[in-house]
Amino acid sequence: MNLLNKIVNTKKEELINLRRKFHKHPERGWLELYTTVEIIKYLDNLAYDLKYGKQILKESSRQGLPTDSEFKEASKRAYKWGADPELLDEIKDGYTGVVATIKSNKPGPTTALRFDIDAIGAREDCSDKHRPMRENFSSINPHAVHSCGHDGHIAIGLGLAKCVKELFVQNKLRGKVIFIFQPAEEGVRGARAMADTDILETVDYFLSGHIGFKSDTTGQIICGITNSLYTKKLDISIQGKSSHAGAAPQEGQNALLAAVNAVSALYSLTQHGSGMSRLNVGRLKAGTYRNLVPENAEIEMEIRGENDEVISYLFKKVKDVFKGIEDMFNVSVKMEIVGEASAVKSDQKLIDIVKGSAKNVKDIKHIIKEDRLGGSEDVSLLMEKVQNQGGQACYLMFGSDIKAGHHSSNFDFDEKVLSTAVQLYLESLKSLGNINL
Ligand SMILES: [Zn+2]
């Protein structure tokens, strides 16, 4: 058994306990207050150099923020759960997430590792068939559940940070390792605000990964995701003017009519020939009463595309549609980007390094070199930033048996994946030159 193996073996139980603690206390994107405070406390004990709050998030780049009442409710909840009030005060109102750095005095690369920390806004299955319920670690927040596995990602990040600290104490660390705990991945909202700061400026290598998803068998690993879809999530509000529908319809500005015309125009858009694209209007809400010309309408929609050209073209056409309906129906339109991601494109060199490292991890039985991601992931924005500076990035999948699909109320994963992932990260850090045994 090699040293990395030994170090991870002593953390197996703690990894499961950490996962279960965060599973029990899930919080949605930008509301991860208890979560952030607990991460800070854990890493502070390990004497990591910590940054959080406005140091790691560009205020104006935060997308899809919750409402004021949701912020207040989340603060109260985190306080009730025992989160440190002083720390809470620094991060409330949507400044969640943590960046922790450890630096050796020996030369070596700077490697960043990213872990997403948010939960899904839904209720958890409360039947006895569901293991978190049976084993008493199910969600105590009726508005959220860790049904995507990010509770596992937090545990992996913290456990790994502990292992890296041990190697540092043993004088085996080289260069710098940066742990990024990112808020609000769901809805692809959180990465933009982190990418727009300087936290990734000196990064040579960037690694991140997801439990399950395309790899739903324990012991399997996908070394690099090589493609995913560009996406933009848009909220549109249309403001018109109400009037009596029988007596004075000519005085109204019909927002509902404008909205339905916009929707049919959106679905009629000419598509770009250089790649596939998708458009969906997922929600339309308009009007107030039967006999009033509707004065407002709200649309929630998204677009996706295979490449930059396709998504830029489609986004321009969407804006053209709303410009058109402003003139046609004499309404005013406000559009907000509430989430976005570019394509996840792992570097081949780094995929090969992860693949070579995976061979040293005993629990990995089946290595898949690369695959495509069916959906979108805002890790792409962080990867793109590193790649544009000349660094390399890779996004991988940690195989795990899955009880139900991601985001289902009875989602659960095989906790064996936690130690496997930590070990693979350690082996990769060794291959990259951050760990010298
Ligand atoms: Zn996820």
Image: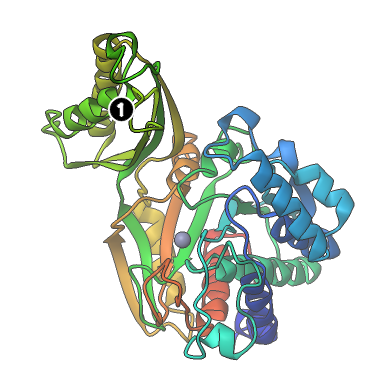
Q: Residues within 10 Å of mark 1 (few under 14, many from 20)?
A: many
In this picture, is 254 found above or below 140?
above
In this picture, is 230 found above or below 45?
above
- Residue 103, image x, y percentages: 74, 53
Q: Nearer the viewer, residue 289 or 175?
A: 289
Q: How many marks?
A: 1
In this picture, is 252 found above or below 136?
above
Q: Residue at x 50, y 41 (%)?
A: 386
- Residue 42, image x, y percentages: 78, 65
Horizontal side of residue 252 vs 162, given as left or right: left
Q: Residue at x 71, y 52 (%)?
A: 73
Q: Nearer the viewer, residue 138 or 90?
A: 138
Q: Residue at x 73, y 37 (%)?
A: 55
- Residue 120, image x, y percentages: 51, 60
- Residue 230, image x, y percentages: 32, 41
The outermost residue toward the right is 86
Residue position for label 1: 256
Q: Nearer the viewer, residue 134 or 385?
A: 134
Whether residue 306 is visible: yes
Quarter that holds the C terminus: bottom right
Q: Amino acid at mark 1?
A: Leu
